[in-house]
Amino acid sequence: MRGNPNCSDCKLHRNAAAVCVMGDGPRDADIMVIGKMPNSDKNQTALEQQLEEVGLDPKRVYFTSALKCVNWEDSASNAHVKACRQYLEQELEEVKPTHILALGNEGLNAAAGKSGITKYRGQLFEKDGYTVIPTISPMAVNRNPGQRPGYMADLRLFANTYLGKATGVKVPKWAFIDTKAKLKKLKTILERTHLISFDIETTVHNLGEFDPNAKIITLAGTCLVTEVDAQTGGERDRIFGFCLPLYHPESPFQTTWKSVLKFLKPALEGIPKGVAQNGKFDCRWLTHFGVNMNHTFDTMLAIHLLNENIAKGLKPNAQARLGVPPWGIDTKDLLSEPLAEVAEYNFLDTYYTYLLYKQLKQELIEQPRLLRIMTKLYMPASRDLVPTERRGVWLDIDRLRERKPKVEEKLRSIEDQLKEYLPDPESDDWPMDTKGRKKLEVNFNASRFARWFLFDWMQLPVLERGKEKPDGSPGDPSMAEDVLLHLQADHPHKVIDLMLERVSWQKNLSSFFNAYEVMYDDEHRVHTTFKLAGTVTGRLSSGKDTTDKISGKANLRGVNLQQVPRDPLIRGMFGAPYGWSFVEADYSQIELRIAAFIANERHMIALYQQGADIHMTTAMAVTGLPKAQVTKEIRKKVGKPVNFGFLYGMGWRKFIETAFNNYGAVFSESEAQAYRRAYFELFPDLPRWHDRQRRLVRTYGRVQSPLGRVRHLPDIHSPEKGVQAEAERQAINSPVQGFASDMALLSMTIINQKFREAGIAGHCLGLVHDAINFEIRDDELERALPIIKDTMEDPVPLRKKFGTILTIPIVADLKVGRHWGDAHEVEDPEVIYDPDRLNEWLAKNHPTYLHKSLAAA
DNA sequence: TATCCCTGCGCG
DNA sequence: AAAGCGCGCAGGGATA
């Protein structure tokens, strides 16, 4: 094994103290440790001591690194790991280790091909016949001693795995329900079960449970059953595990699986407590086939609340928290796997979920504020989202059919105009592909052709480039909108206009028209999946069901309902079916209000209490215009971004950019600096709050929202100042963004509850961060609208259950109409509370509104 | 053909 | 020295 001292495969060799240093250790070692770069003697000694501490003999370990150059000056990425892999592979080939300890993100990438060490640390991977366990880099531990216990735990896991020490998890016997007699017995046991950890395996389809061929393959559970002692008469718990085969080809119930479910339905629905990992998915499927479980604890949501930065899957958490070995089978096509294996896999899922539940519950009990979020917010929200996702949002197919061709025509016409600037396709000027063999196809997206067109053929100057390539060569010229806007200002050209215009039409067509067209169901409704654990701040995210199981994502069920363009051309395709209304309830400036509350910014609080318009105040201050000249447009394009920007730590450079990009306004450096100063003079408690958050995150490595939601920010301990500063800004933003979204989510659950109590058929369609959308039957608007407005402006449980008393007024604006995009805002809130005036307003502003007397008829 | 990363852009 | 935050998806291009 010889390195190549003349290697120049990546840029790292240039500033390297040593090039291509190969690893060291016995060639017949079972264990290989892969670090980031060759260790210094000091670090090597420390690492060897740590390995001894966990019971390994460092003399029997081969030590090597993902990157063979000693270069701590340049930042390294996975691309550099890749460039270096050939040397590591030589070592793997010769040493043939059975167990690999991967250190840091580079080690993880080299050993397991994954990226994201904070996510994957402490998990076991089987890769190319090696058992790999990654943990954080010892360097990171040196910088941040708080990481040491976790790091040592990972090392222990690695050592125990290698030494074959038992982890202490004993899997109980479980029942395979393959006869009618066993099925009957199962039913009687379920009737005495007070807690079940449940999980189903399903067939995989683009339309999910809505596919005509959708089947539940198996249902498994780990049950806590109340037993009565025959002698003493006392009660005690017994664990009962089972797997019930349903639609599997080897299943005795393959043809009768739906009636089997029906048979068990009362017993299953009678179990008061249901635990599941991402149970919203299982509940959606089970509901689809008629069984409504009581879902009371979701391990995935608990994991997320306890640490928002780690992987949320069952397997990584069971491996890391329970120390169990990897289990599972290829889930792509469970119908062709042996039933015995599917059943075992399914049962193990529920048993490990149950063990995790016990552990997580205990941790939450020790952090009561998180427990409160879990039980009073997350679980109700998770349950409410089941019908929300199943129902979907109504799409006006007539509008879609009518509008799509127009958009296509628009795009075509722009491209025709662009093509006039191209050379003769036969001429030598036409660009060739990288290998110089074929002519490039016309493509005005951000492609090689388009870059050639703008920067070579049209000879426009390159203002900005993308990421540097791994080999150190410069990145591709940027074609982004803001770059083209600057280009246009300095070198006006028709081609830039056309490119700018084209890109938004292209986006409309590919991301929205094409997507929606293949996504609606028989009732003209499109569906989404909301992730409650999809963001680090606590916001929901919206989109498709998990992508990784299905190849070809064109028809995957689910659209992102949080990025529907505001353009009425597109947003106006969503709405409510005839006889129903689309209601959008927006929190007005919610994050700004909450920032004022959290920062205790006295001027801002006073302004809000007076009902003043802060975006307007800011827009006036920034543009220097008198109030009468600040149009709605200026307020929106200047006031809003500047408020949110400076609020969250934007600098004056970015301010200049923002103002130019959104408004075309050109500010000098001194002007921009003056505005920033003026902003903080206007709201002097904001910088004090910023300092407080910086102090908090430096001290504790985490910050909390008023509800107690935690954001962990380990990056604050980074040696890089820029990374630290980023963590500081996140410490400022997170409590605000997190609290705002928790308020919206809480309101959603309360409104749903009130609708149920009032027998209102209307329902929530989903959250768009600070807005809640509803579909309300026309004749119920007068009952529903006051509930929505009252609840959002004062979600009582916020005070009663969470003890948070706001010092700022909260305002919700309601828009009502047939379609989302052209619903009208109810300007005068009093209208909402006066049925006669509301009817009058609706008759005037709602194109298809049915008066309740008509609707009833 | 599937997968990864990057660019670019939609939303709050 | 300089620094808004938070997402998901489509398309391009390289790679295996």
Image (tube, coloured by chain):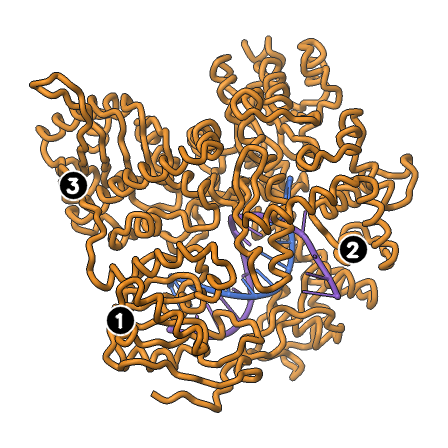
Chain colours: A orange, B blue, C purple
Mark 1 or mark 3, whichever is nearer to me = 1
Residue pictured at 44% horizontal, 32% vertical: A371
* Protein chain holding label 3: A
Q: Is residue A635 left or right of residue A388?
A: right
Can you identify the residue that label 2 sits on?
A652
10 Å crowding of disc 2: few (<14), some (14-19), many (20+): many
Q: What is the CA distance from the residue labelled 2 to the residue labelled 1?
A: 56 Å
Q: Of residues A362 and A527, which is closer to you in this image?
A: A362
* Protein chain holding label 1: A
Can you identify the residue that label 3 sits on?
A172
Which quadrant of the figure has residue A557? top left
In this orientation, does residue A263 appear?
Answer: no
Q: Is residue A657 left or right of residue A769?
A: right
Q: Residue A327: percent from the left, percent from the top?
A: 24, 52
Name the residue type under label 1: Asp
Mark 1 secondary-structure assignment: loop
